[in-house]
Amino acid sequence: MKVIYVLWLREVKRYLRSRVQIIASLGNPILYLLVLGFGLGPVFRRAGNGDYLQFVAPGIIGMSILFTSIFSGIGLLWDRQFGFLKEMLVAPVSRMQIMVGRTLGGSTVAVFQGLLITVICLLAGFRPTHWIAIPYAIGFMVLIAINFAALGVAIGSGLQDMQGFQLIMNFLVMPIYFLSGALFPLTDTKSVLKYITRADPLSYGIDGMRNVLGSPNHAFDPRIDVLVLCVVGFVFLIFGAYRFSKIEA
Amino acid sequence: MIRVTNLVKKFDKLTAVDDVTFNVEAGEIFAFLGPNGAGKTTTIKMLTTLLHPTSGSIELDGLNPQTHQHEARQRFGIVFQDPSLDGELTAWENLQIHAVLYHVPGKVARQRAEELLKLFELWERRNDQVKKFSGGMKRRLEIARGFLHTPRILFLDEPTLGLDPQSRNQLWTHVKRVNEAENVTVFLTTHYMDEADRVAHRIGVIDHGKLVTQGTPAEIKEQTGTTTLEDAFLKLTGSTIREESASSADQMRQFAKMWSGGKK
């Protein structure tokens, strides 16, 4: 337990110390929020879908959690050669403990990041229907973070070089984001897109937040959202732990 | 302390380590020398449980590292060729995490960390982030960390790579001091022959995966009829340059150099 705790603490300390990085990582979500929120707002309203800012805010929160958590896992690539990971891999502790500590640390950092974005959304004018909904929304943030931190570990364990990183970014992370319904409603997607968006776990995380925060156009039952996130998260954790155990230092 | 018998490691068609046998006694400083790609790092990886041998046996302090992985790991410390400190954390925090990973109780860990930081002349800088340290200081901290859980054996894989003569000299003085004070066995690799000559009690030379010779520096020089270890080494391993194709690790090393402004 102590091992998991120190490794978790390490991730959190690293995050809190890299202030520049925190600020830099806020840029992208703010851009999306302002450009899409205010740019597309009038069109969205005219189409009869309600207030776009109310709609897109959970999507932007989900996006920042997705990126932060998945990158914490992909960072293994770097860490393995020039970082602390090697030190952990030769220590007399099980790989499982290391993986769990790291995944929890990465998830915690991602949830922090999500909360920061939540504050920014509130400043920009986003209003949940009930303030009581915030803890439930945080619950969904935690689920999203664990899902993708575990997936990140699974991917990072196998990456060999920087080119691989670009590949993952363009063919996995960006599609997960754009196909999640973060930016458009999933309620009336048609044909193939409908199935693809429903195969994306992030869809359920963001939809869950929309559900509890009272945003317009949520697509599924919140219980379905929780169920899918838990099942997929469990699978990703097993997959990540398996891949991590196969790393050759 | 280290007993290696008929050790073989094959990667697909390449035989990286070919029937190597040697012993290192307790308290000895043993230098493992060889040109690039001779099989030094592969041997260290097998000794430190990171790779499984194809055949042959290894014994560390009487333990088989394959069947008793955790027990064996508890008994050795290792300093890798590439840095493995956490730059965002302070020197002190790096040591404390190591202590937890190696199950050193808190009080002992604090005491021992203080002792080692003082010995390695890093005590005043203990609360600074490691990324602000010079290359030599980082190396010293890594070695201090390797000694933290009072290992029986310390492995050093090219620890002085890229350091200036002053830092190298100082580093070996410290290593020797702990070696004598705590009777720790030291197994090292290096490309600097003068270092091996000065520090090591015994030397093994490996080339193309085979152990070419072993003995004290004096014995090896006598054997080859040369006056310096460098000449002896060249005589034993030839003067052709070993071309190594750049692995992904090398490419990343290049990248890391670029990002850290050339200093490692």
Image: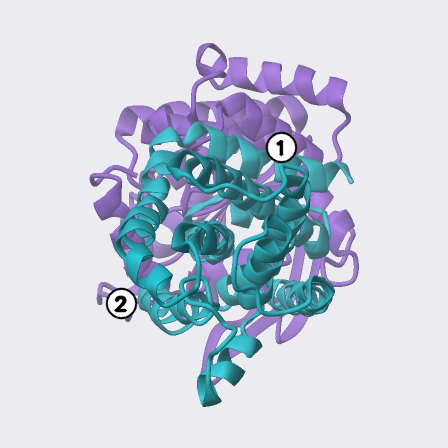
Chain colours: A cyan, B purple
Amino acid identity at mark 2: Arg
Q: Residue at x 51, y 44 (%)?
A: A114
Q: Residue at x 64, y 67 (%)?
A: A236
Same subunit, labels 2 and 1: the answer reads yes
Disc number placed over residue B113 in the picture, else none: none
Q: How many marks?
A: 2
Q: Residue at x 40, y 63 (%)?
A: A183
Q: Is residue B105 visible?
A: yes
Q: Tag 1, which secondary structure?
A: helix
Chain ID of residue with mark 1:
B
Q: Nearer the viewer, residue A245 or A91?
A: A245
Chain ID of residue with mark 2:
B
Mark closer to the chain start, 2 or 1: 1
Q: What percent of the width, then of the height, locates residue A2?
A: 75, 36
Q: Residues within 10 Å of mark 1 (few under 14, many from 20)?
A: many
- Circle 2/circle 1 CB separation < 8 Å: no
Q: What percent of the width, then of the height, locates residue B93?
A: 56, 26
Q: What percent of the width, then of the height, locates residue A118?
A: 49, 40
The quadrant of the picture occupied by the C terminus of chain B is top left
Q: Residues within 10 Å of mark 2 (few under 14, many from 20)?
A: few
Q: Is residue B72 left or right of residue A69?
A: right
The CA span between labels 2 and 1 is 39 Å
Q: Is residue A90 visible?
A: no
Q: Residue at x 53, y 49 (%)?
A: A86
Q: Which residue is mark 2?
A: B242
Instruction: Identify the image quadrant of residue A138.
Output: top right
A174 relative to A65, above or below = below
Mark 2 or mark 1, whichever is nearer to me: 1
Q: Is residue B109 left or right of residue A199?
A: right
Q: What percent of the width, then of the height, locates residue A11?
A: 55, 39
Q: Which residue is mark 1?
A: B97
Q: Nearer the viewer, residue B245 or B94?
A: B94
